[in-house]
Structures are given as structure tokens and as C-alpha cells.
Image: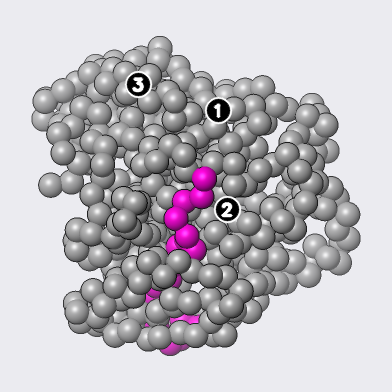
Amino acid sequence: MHADATALAEAIGCGKMTARQAMERSLAAAEQHESLGCICYLDAEQGLAAADAFDALPVDQRKSMPFGGVPTLAKDLGGPFRGFAVSAGSKSLPRQGGEADSDLASRFRDGGFCLFGITTTPEFGLSLASEPAIGPISRNPLDPSLTPGGSSGGAAAAVAAGIVSIAHATDAGGSIRVPAACCGLVGLKPGRGAMAAGPLFGNHLGGIASELAVCRSVRDAERAFSVLSGSARGPYPPVEQAVARSGKLRVGLLTELGSDVAIDPVRAKAVADAARALEAQGHEIVSLAWDDIRAVVEASGRAFRDVIAINLASLAKLPGIDASLWEPMTQAVAEEGARMSGVEVWDMAQAMVYVSRDLHALFDRFDCLLTPMLASAPRPTGSFPSDHRDTDLHFARMGSFAPLAAIANISGFPAITLPFGVDRAGLPLPVQMIAPMGHEALLLALAARLEGEERWSHPFPITGLDR
């Protein structure tokens, strides 16, 4: 039996506990795990009010909500969620906004989620650790000396610690998948156009960003995607979702990245083990060499850096924004964006198109691509400092840690990560799968097969639920 958000919703739905009791337990767990730094803003009053409002609904209405009464947290980027102003991890935004729900936030509420706080992110999401200068520093509950990843690191730490069973997250360059991989969670980055991004499109980032959640199980990811996706109302046409194919699939396998990036042999082996498990289930494995995908990976890294730089340069010019308050790294990246010419911006946009085209061409050979998610175990806290201006070093550090993250964002393809084993230190061994546009169902089906191998179990129970 899964101990996850679905199980918690079922426990609330069948009367084993009320939403208020579930909320009270999450609030107590948040206090117990305060040292993890995963929650940067907590509003117990709003959380309890949301739970009480759910408990007061008619029974039929409560039971119609897939995540009825489940406590959750929003990320300090994305949304916005009414009543929860964000700071984006920055001193320059002292809890702004939160006057109205985004389309996605409305769907969270309609699904039955009860929100009580906001999770820690790096300043404007510019790191694969969640250690904003304004604090708090988010730590990995599996080993507090390590990062839970970024930029949805606070969300992942809260879910892994059992404070909540699921949490809102965003992904522009691995920001759902990297924290999920660090903390032993399931992280689905939906494909471009699958998720509502309006009405402000404030965290759109030229189409590379997407929102969903970090989860404890594949079924939670599947249910969350079903509840929250579709009818995005721009800026891209609706994505037609393909039904997951049954029968034999061709799975592309990439386990090494040449001499440029050293993949921890234990983590490369986990990917090979996952391929063998899928092969034993009747699927065909198609091996890839680094040279088959190297150009796409490198182009994606360059485009990701340019998009982030341009976005920050634009943000710095908004009324009421004092960029002098930004961390040194954020300022330096914004200055890069401000120096880019129109021709350079156009070239970047063209490069993104070609990444998508070339990745589609690769998928002529297989249906799904299986790769490492991280090159190493989660890094110690402080491994991605932002108190310097060496932008080359900063992006190189991120690229060497999660070298195959940005290709899904730049191409717009959906991708998922989940743990498939445990190392000697008790840390998860994550794998990543990528599929063409509209094939989230395929990723979820394959991920469920791998999850069924039971190579990983969560050390911390969900608050209020037995294992």
C-alpha cells in the first residue's frame, strides 16, 4: 500500500480523520522539522480555515475532490496562490502579490488541497540548491548536511520529511526533477502547453517553465497531472494527450556522457538496472552513445542560460524592483542578459526550435529515453554559492550536477524522475525518462512499472498516516 497523498485523501474521505486533524498534524510536523528550512512562510490560520471549509462541505462534494482535505504547500515561485504572497527568495520582493489565484492555483483548490505555507527557493530559482541569502537554508531530510536540490528544494524537503504528502513545484531547468531526485521522490515535468500558466504568465520564461508537484508516488503524480492539466488557455495550443501504448516499447538508454561529465558509477548502474527491468517486462532497449545526443544537450544548456539571463534583465527593469538588493550572482546573470543584442536573442530562439527538432529526430529510434538524473549524490550545502559573480562557474556547477535536465525544458518535452535503488549512504539512486510531446501517460506508465520493483522506500512516514 502506498503512503502518499492519495492514501491521505482516502483516509480523510472515509472518516478516519478530518481535514482539520490532517492540517493540525502537518502544522505540528512543520514545527518539528523547522531546522530543515523547507518552509519560508507559514500561515496556520489560513491552513486551518481551509481545512475547516473543506470539512463543512457536503459529503458528495468532498468525495468528488481527488485530493480532498490534503494539506499542501506552494512554492515561492510560480502560482500565485491567493492569500500567499511570494518573495521569490529575494530581498527585493518582501512578500508581494497573492491577491488572486492563478488558473493553476484555482485547480489546486478545486482538487481539494488545503494550503498553509510557502516553500523555500533560491533567489528567482537561480540555483540547484535552495539557499537564498535571506534564508532559510533548506536541507535534505535524508542527510541535513546535503542539499535537497533546487529550485523546488523546500517543496521536496517538506514532502520527503513527511510534513506534507505532496507540494506544488515548478521546473524551468530541472527544478522539479532535481529536488525529487535528491530526496527520493517522483517528479514529473509536464510538456509545454499541458499546464495552465495564466492569467499573468509571470513564470512562463519563454515556454521553458512548467508547474506541477513533487510527489511520493507515481500514482500521485498521475492523479495530480490529471487534476491540474489541460485547458491551459495559452500561450500555446492545447497539447493532445496520447493514450499510453500497451505492448512492447523501444526504450533508448544513455548511461555515459563522455569525458565532459563524470557520472557516478553507482548512479549509472541504477539506470542500466532500470533498463534491464524494463527489458524483462518485454520492452526493447536501444543503446545510445554520448555523441548521439551531445549537440542537443550542449545547445540546451546555452539556451537555458540565455533565457534565464534575459528574464532577469527584464525583471530588473520593472517598477518597484531594486536590483541592487539582489545577490551577486543574480545581478551578474541579469547583466549578461542586458548585454545581449537582438540578434543574439533571435539566435537563442532559433536554437530552441532546433533542439526540439533534433530531439524529435532522435525519437524516431525509440519511444522513451532513459537517462541518469544526477551525476552524483546530492551535494553538500554551500556547493552552489551565490555570493560571487563568476557566472561561468555557476552554470558549470549546475550542468555537471544535472547534465541532462535542461533538454526537456528547452525542447518542451515531458520528463519524469523517480528513485530506482539506494546507495550505501542510504541516498536514492534516481533515473530520468523523457518522451515526446503529449506522452506524459507513457512516462507515468513506465515509471509505475519501475516503482513496482520496490527499489526504494521512504524513511519518513507522512504525518498522520501509517506506513
Q: CA distance from mark 2 to mark 3?
A: 31 Å
Range of residues picked out in magenta = 362-380
Q: At which x and y percent is residue 376?
A: 47, 60
Using residue 354 as the reference point, say whether residue 213 is left or right of it.
Answer: left
Identify the image's colour scheme: rainbow, by chain, secondary structure or one colour: one colour
Using residue 299 as the reference point, say whether residue 337 is left or right of it.
Answer: right
For disc 3, the neighbor class at 10 Å (few under 14, some 14 to 19, many from 20) is few
> Which of the 4 image quarters holds residue 449?
bottom left
Furthest-top residue in this view: 45
Q: CA distance from mark 2 to mark 1?
A: 22 Å
Instruction: Name the residue at 43% across, 37% down.
Output: 144
Q: N-terminal of the two: label 1 or label 3?
A: 3
For disc 1, the neighbor class at 10 Å (few under 14, some 14 to 19, many from 20) is many
Using residue 253 as the reference point, say whether residue 281 is left or right of it.
Answer: left
The residue identified by callout 2 is 172
In the displayed structure, 182 sits above or below 65; it is below
Is 172 magenta? The answer is no
The residue identified by callout 3 is 32
User: What is the quadrant of the C terminus in the image?
Assistant: top left
Q: Is residue 315 visible?
A: no
In the image, what residue type sits under mark 3? Gln
The residue identified by callout 1 is 136
Instruction: Name the residue at 40% across, 12% down.
Output: 45
Q: At which x and y percent is residue 147?
A: 49, 43
SS state under label 3: helix
SS state under label 2: loop
> Which of the 4 image quarters holds residue 423?
bottom left
In the image, what residue type sits under mark 1? Pro
